[in-house]
Image (cartoon, rainbow, N blue to C red):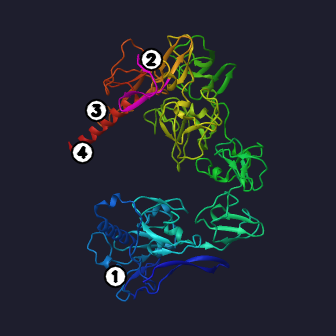
Amino acid sequence: MSSVGVFHKVEMDENLYFVYKLTQTDYPTSSGEVLAMDSTGDDQPLDQPLFLCPDARIKFHKLKIQREDGDIFDYDFKFHPYISSPHFPSKRSGDQQGESLLDCDEDGICKLPVVPLFWCNNKESDSREFQCGGCRDSMLSASYYACLQCEKKFHKECVESPLEIKHPTHLFHSLRLYYHPAPEFCICCKTEVFMIFYHCLTCNLSMHPVCAMRKVPFFIDHPKSHPHPLTFFPTQASLVCHFCALIKKLDPTYICTKCVFVIHKGCIGFPHVIRISRHTHRISFTSSLPCGKLSCGVCHQQVDNDYGAYSCKKCDAYFVHSKCALQRHVWDGKDLEEVPEEDDMIDDGEPFKRIADGIILHPFHSHNLHLQTTRAYDENTYCRGCALPIYEGQFYSCIESDFILHEHCANAPRMKRHPLHPHPLTLVVATRGPGNEEGTFQCDACHRKGTGFFYEHHTDQENIFMLDIHCASIFEPFQYQGHEHPLFLPSEPNKWGRCQMCTYEYVNLNLNCLECDYILCFHCATLPYKVRYKHDSHFLKICNGKEANDQSYWCEICEGKIEEGTERAFYNTPKKDTSFYKCNACCTTLHQRCLLGIDTYMKPGETVKDYLSSIKYASEGQSKESITDVQILLNSSPTRPICTRCLCRCPFPIFFKGHNTIFCSWDCVEDSAMRSYQRLLYSFLWG
C-alpha cells in the first residue's frame, strides 16, 4: 500500500494554490464502529480513513531500531526512515507492518485509531494550551486529532504524515519521513524537530510535518512588497531574492516577469522602516543603492548594489544587509513606517535634578551631592555607581554620608540604546528588595556580579537583560587604548572567539578587529586601562601577559611571578593571571586580580548598616527559613582573614563576612550557600 504525499493545483476562494493530498491506492475507512464527537457533543460516524496514534507509531519505530542496532540506540545519531504507514490496518489492506504494531506487546503502544477533534478545530487555538504528542511541538495547525487511549492531542499533519512527500519547492528530491535522536532545525519555521519530521539526505534539510503539508499559493498580490502580482516559481535553486540577497532552499520563491523581480515568500511583507541596535537613527529599505563599494553596518561585509538593503537617510554612508538588519538580537520586531519619530524617542537626559551650580539631587540618593575635584588618591574611596575607586578627575559626594559618584557615573542617562540589545535600557541601581534578595545584579555582557548602577530591559514576555555601567559605555567602533585599530561586535550571535587578553573563549559577547585577528572580551575591555596603587605615585597601565615573557616581573602583592598563562587556582574557579598593571617609571608590577580582585564591581561598605552592600544566603546550621546577611568589607587590616570555605587567606581588596563566616570571593559565598541548601534539603527528605 503506497503512502506518498503530493501537491495539486486547486482553486480556492478565486485563488490558485498548491494543496497537499495523500495519494494511496487503498485505505480503510470506518464502518460506523469508530465514532468521533463533534462540537455539539453528538457521536458522529467517520466517513474517512483511520489513522494510527503517532505516539504509538514513534514508540514502535524506536523499538524496531533498538532491536536492529542493539543497546547503542541512544548513541546512534543516524537518520532512521519510517517504514510503517500512518493508516490504521484492516484485514483487506494487507498492511503487515501495521499489523505488527497492533501485535506488539510492549507497554504504552496504543491500539486504537485516533479521532478528529471537532471541538478544538472550531475554536481559536492557543499555543500555550497545546503540545502535539507526536512532534512534541506547540505549533498551531488547522486541524487536530486525539487518541482515546493515551489521551494525547496531535497535529493533523503528524497523524496523516506519509512516508514520502513530493514538495513543490523541492522538485528534484522527495522528502522522506525520519526519526532522529538529536534535534534538527526546520528550514521553514526554524524550530527543533527530531521525533517525526521530513528530511532530504542529499540537500541536508529538514521540515516539520505542519510546514511540509502547508498549502502554497500560486499567486500573491502584496502591493507593499511589490506593485505587481507575484507568481510562484518552483525551480528557485539559482534565483537570488531581491530583498535578502540570498538563495533559500524550500522557501517558496515568487517572481514578477515584468520587473524581473524575485522574492521569497518569507520575505514578503518585510518592514520598510525599522530601528536597529547598531545605529542611532532609523533605517529604511531601499531597492536602489548608490554605486561604489558599500559596507554593512552589522557584519561589515560588502553590500551588493544589485539588491535591496536598509540605509540611513541622515547618514549618507550607512547601509545594512536586509538579513543582518532583521536578526533577533539586532531588530526589536517593530515596523515604524507609520509611527512618528517623536513617538519613538526615549528619555535619554540627565537622571538627576540640578539644585545649583555644582549641586545635584540624584534619584538613587536622598541627599544633595556636591561636585569636587580629586586631590589625593584614597584607596578606600569607592564610587557607588561603578564600584571602582576614585582615581582622578571630578566626582560628586554627599556631605552627610559616604555616597560618592564619578562625574561620568552621575551623568549616566536615564535610558539608552545599546548595540547589545534591540530594546531601550533603563538605568537602575542594585538594591535589596522584592525580586532581588541579594541586592546584586549580574551583567549579561561580562558576566560579573555588581552592586552599583546598571541598565536593564524587562517585560512580561521576555527575560531580563542587564548591562553594568561599564559595558553600557562601549559602542561601535570601540577605540581600545591597548590596540591600534577600532573594535566591532560580531554579526553572528553564536560565534566563538578567544580573547587576546585573558585567553579565554567567549561566545557572542566579544569585540573583534576588522584589520587583524585581535579579539577582546567584554570582561577585559571594561577593565580600567589606568589605575592607581597606594605605594606608587604614578598611574599603572594594563599590560598583556605576553609582555611578561621577555622580562621577569613579580607581583608586589602576592610576590608571585607574572607570566603568560600563569594558573592561580582559587577555590571553585581556576583563573589565569594573563594581564597585569605596570608603572614604567617605578617598575611596579601587579597582577590584575591582586590589585582589583575578582569581584571588581562589588562596592565595600564601611558599616554594618550599609544594607545596599549586604547579600542574603542560607546560613549553615540554621533552618531553611533563616537568612543571614553577608557584608562586603575592605580587606585593609594587617592580618588577612581566612576564608571559611576554601581555608585560604583572603587575597583580594574586599572580602565577605556572614554569620560567623568569612569568604574571600563571591564564588565561595555561592558555593557555601549551595552546600547549605543541599544539606537542608537532605535533612528534610531523609530526617
Q: In the rendered structure, which disc, 2 or 3, sits on the residue that comes first in sequence?
A: 2
* Mark 4 neighbour density, 10 Å: few (under 14) some (14–19) many (20 or more): few
Kindly state the secondary structure of the residue where label 4 is placed: helix
Q: Name the residue under label 4.
A: 685
Q: In the rendered structure, which disc, 3 or 4, sits on the residue that comes first in sequence?
A: 3
Give the mark toward the camera: 2 or 3.
2
Q: In the rendered structure, which disc, 4 or 1, sits on the residue that comes first in sequence?
A: 1
- Residue type (three-letter) at the residue carrying disc 2: Cys
Q: Which mark is on residue 96?
A: 1
Image x and y of residue 662, in percent: 34, 23
- Magenta stretch holds residue 462: no
Q: Nearer the viewer, residue 214 or 259?
A: 259
Q: Give the range drawn in magenta.
A: 556-579
Q: Which residue is drawn at 59% across and 29% down?
A: 363
The answer to whether the residues at label 4 and label 1 have Cβ atoms under 8 Å apart is no
Q: Which mark is on residue 622?
A: 3
Q: Name the residue under label 2.
A: 555
Q: Nearer the viewer, residue 632 or 330?
A: 330
Q: Quadrant of residue 648?
A: top left
Query: Whole-Å distance between the Cαs marked 1 and 2?
Result: 78 Å
